[in-house]
Structures are given as structure tokens and as C-alpha cells.
Amino acid sequence: MKIAFGKRALCLGLLWICAAGAVAQQRTYCNPMDISYRYNFEQLNERISYRSGADPVIIAHKGEYFLFVTISGGWWKSKDLVGWQYVVPDKWPMEDMCAPAALSVRDTLFLFQSTFEQRPIFYSTEPGQGKLKFYNRWLPRLPKDIGPWDPALFHDPDTDKWYMYWGSSNVYPVFGAELDHGRRLTYANPEPSKAYQPMFWLDPWQHGWERFGPNHSDPIKPFVEGAWMTKHNGKYYLQYGAPGTEYNVYANGTYVGKHPLGPFEYAPYNPVAYRPGGYATGTGHGNTFQDHFGNYWNTGTTWLGIVWGMERRIVMHPAGFDKDDQMYANTRFGDFPHRLPTGKWQNSNELFTGWMLLNYKKPVTASSTLDTLRAELTVDENPRTFWVPTRNRPGETLTTDLGADHDVRAVQVNYVDYKNNVFDSDSTVYTQFRLFASRDGKKWDRIADLTQEPKRDRACAYVELPAPVRARYIRYEHVYTAGPYVAVNGFRVFGNGLGKAPASPAGLKAVRQKDQRNADISWEKVPGAVGYNILWGIAPDKLYQAYQVWNDQPNRLELRALNVGVPYSFAVEAFNENGVSTVSQVVSVK
């Protein structure tokens, strides 16, 4: 296919080349996180090939950030939370780490794996160089099935005491134990049966969001996972993931106590991090950390489940504590572009760029199509549908028609591993493509070119343009990805239209069901809206939760994530390609 280039294309190309490879100049990020997800050998014996990342822990350590992810053969480092460089350790434990615990104390980073056996705690004073040493040789084995699986390490700076928390089960609770630093962080109580104690169990009969299944609809007993401890204002926030990684409602909650080992009280505003609607749904099993400016963040796991049930990606959302010490994570527009902070923010909504999704279910064409894996499946915001061309060859294209001129600011291209035969993330595994823009569908300007940057694997490639490009059409031109097939499950174009934001929705109603864990929410549709955010929380000024719904879906929602005996307030906002409406009138229910 012939592409016409002009002076404008040359200027745009020069602008992009100046920015290419200079990750420090990137000002925004977009979930799922753009890292080099590793091919997961977990199912190698079944000959199933897939990239995956889950159970993230981000640690700020000595001016850098370090990211640890389940079964990744190493870790990542970053200066700015956006440019992540993969680090290969100089030594590794007996098997790769699942759901690792990581902790920075003074000049040392500690690392520990999930296990039911005797395993060591590692440490490093040079994690950026992959230097890893044994801190202790063997943490004693606990009784059968107790763990510690999905562990978290915690150091209380006020008392200089050390603790560990863990839990990954629909039978057992979250456990906690004190560690003895004087004995190289072995259990403070040397008797294995007395070394740990229960912290809390799930209670799905009182906490609607802890129910299993899609939209909390499955009677299977839910799973508690991914413990994490944060100390804030003298209080201990023991966090956990529930009800299971495989669904859109995977979330993080917290119990709060006055001592690291409790007793703990359930936070009535749970879940803390929750995103059941949108493209990257699910926020469970991550950690809470502070960046170099003191801002809080909450990480988590979003589910794909295309090639294998445990195929996942990772997400990161702004978080914090309000004036009443209520913990929250901001997942409103959680998979749209957000700004990287350059200082302490006053309100986490400041990070939302206002760049809207421009091509939701807009017309899209492809150079070729394999079977029924059609081009339109890349713009439906469903990560489990995807396009595959007939061959994995350079020059295959996807072209999306935005319907009118828009100011395009960023593009995200998400890949999946359809019938792949790659089992190791070696030097042959990388992704490359080019992006073009046009106002008339005839004259095309190149606006991005990943062949001009160092080769790396970008399963969730996010490209921020150095300047807005006015265009009606955006084209993806394939260059390279490893394996026999190209498979794209998300071709997402962000920016702003030239029209008006939608009006504020009217007619909001909220009715609590007899089962107080559920509420029926309805509103009047707004002309020109693309979607809505249902905002809710435990008070009119605490609407920290957001449930995203598209305009082509019914204008009603059964919300099944409420806590029994807790009053709630609701509001709704509409959005389209041009922006976001004002928030509706708040409706409160008991």
C-alpha cells in the first residue's frame, strides 16, 4: 500500500524522532502498564505460550523504582514510573518467584517469594545491577497449607520492628507474624505452629464486593490474596485482594488497626481500589507505595484470560488518604491517559489528562483478516476479542475512522498471543509498528515509528505524541512481533474532539435491594454521550468509586459491591470524545 508523505509529514517525523527513545520526555502513562511482559514458562509443559504479568509490587528505593511481578525471571527499574528497564539478577532462587514480597529499608531492598516450603529471604544494596544475596538461608517451614503464599514484608519505622503478612486461599484467612531482625528475619516465635496468627477472614455475606464471579454473581467461595501493609497517621492499613483474579471485579480492600498484628476493623468504605467497567478491568492483588514526591499509588492485576486462565497484565492508579484517613484509589478513567506527577498533587483527579477515547466502536478496516478475527474487534473495548491478519508480515494495517477531525494525543496498541510458539523472552522478542494520520484518507503523515527506538517487547505499547495531530483517520502499520501471528486486542486512540462535552445526566435513581449488598442504579441517557461513570461512596463528598458504562449499554446498573448496614451516595457523569460533563445531583440511600 502506497503512503503519501509531504512536508508536514517530514516535520512531524522530525518532531517524533527527537522524542524517540527519550522516555524521560514522556509526560503521560496509560493502563495496562507498558512494560516488557515476559513469556510465562508456567504452562510450558502444556505447550501454551503467553505473555503475562500479575501481583505487582512497586518499591521506591534510593531514587529509583523497582517493579516485581509474578514469574518474570527478574524485575524492572525506573526513574520516573514510565520508562521501565528489565533487570536480570545475578542469582535466583531455586524456582522463579510467584507473587514476591519486596521492601526497602534504609539502603537495603529485601525480597521474598511465595512458598509452602523452606525458602530464604534475599537482599540487595544494588538492585539496579541485579545484585542479590542471601539475607537468611531458610525461613522455617510452617504447618501444611499455611504458607506463606502471597507474602508482604513490613518494617515499622517508629518501633523498628519487622512483620510479614500473607494469604492466598478460600479456606484460610490472612495471616500475620512478627519477624526477629536479630535472627536474620526468621519468625519471632521459633515454634512453627505458634509463629503466626490469623488477621481476618472474608465475609461475602456482609461485603458484597467479596463475592466471587463476574459482577459478584458466582456462589463459589471467594479467595483472599495479596496482603500488603501501609502505615499512615499512626494507623495500620492491612490490605488484601478479593474475590479472585479471573473476573472484572478483582479489587483491593483494607482492614485498619492500631497495632501491626491487630486487632483490625473492616473499613466500611471498601473496596479501596475497584474498576469493574472499561478496558482494563480489575485492580486486585497489588501494593500501595509512595513516589519520590510523597504521592500514594495503588497497583493491581487486570485479567485477560484468552490463552490461559492466568493470563494477566498490571495496572497502577493514583491513591491516597483523605482528611478523615479514609484510604482510596482513583480508578475514574483508569485506563485512559494520565499525567505523570512532577510534584505533590492536591487532588488525584489532577492527573487525568482529559484525553478521551476517540474510536470506541468507530469504523475500522484491515489489510487482511484471518477467519472471523475481524478488525472491529480491536475497538470494542473488550480485551478478550482481537484481530488477526492472514500473515505475520510487515505492512499489515489497521485503519480507524474517527468520523471527523480530532486532535489526537496518544495511541495504545495491545497485543495478545494467539496460537503462539514463543516460550522465552529472548532477543528475538520485540514489537515494532508505525502510526500514520490523515484528514482525508488519501494523504498520510507518519506520526510515530517504533523502529527508531531500541528493540523491546511492548505488549501494551502506549505512544504519546510530542504534539497534538489533527486527523480523522489513524493507521497502524505492522512491522514486527515474534511468533506466527499478529493479534491486536486493543487499538485505542486518545485525544479530543472539536465539539462540546455532553450535558450532565438527569433522572438519577438509586434503590437499595432487600439484599443490601445490591443496589439498582438508573439514569437518563444524554444525547451525544459515549459513556457514563457511576460515582459512588459512603458520603456525598466521598464518591471515590467509579463504574464505567458505555452508552450503547442499558442505562441501568445493578451494583453488587455494597456493604451491609453502610449508607451510600451516588452520582453520574457523561463523557464523549470532547470531554466530560459536570457531575449530576447526588442521590443518597440507606
Image (spheres, rainbow, N blue to C red):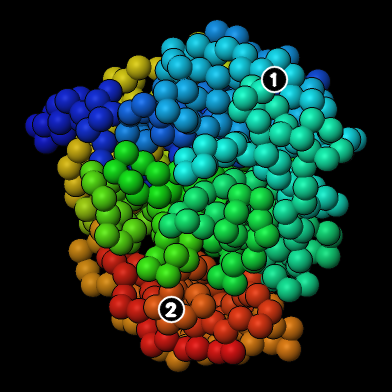
Q: Is residue 158 left or right of residue 346?
A: right
- Nearer-the-camera pick, 304 or 13: 304
The number of numbered badges drawn on the structure is 2
Q: Residues within 10 Å of mark 2 (few under 14, many from 20)?
A: many
Residue 255 coordinates in the image, percent (x, y): 62, 60
Residue type beneath disc 1:
Pro
Circle 1 — which element? loop
Q: Is residue 473 left or right of residue 279?
A: left
- The residue shown at (26%, 36%) is 26
- The residue shown at (45%, 17%) is 125
Residue underneath mark 1: 120
Residue underneath mark 2: 572
Quarter of image, res 554? bottom right
Q: First in sequence: mark 1 or mark 2?
A: 1
Q: Is residue 460 left or right of residue 344?
A: right
Circle 2 — which element? strand
Which quadrant is the N terminus positioned in? top left
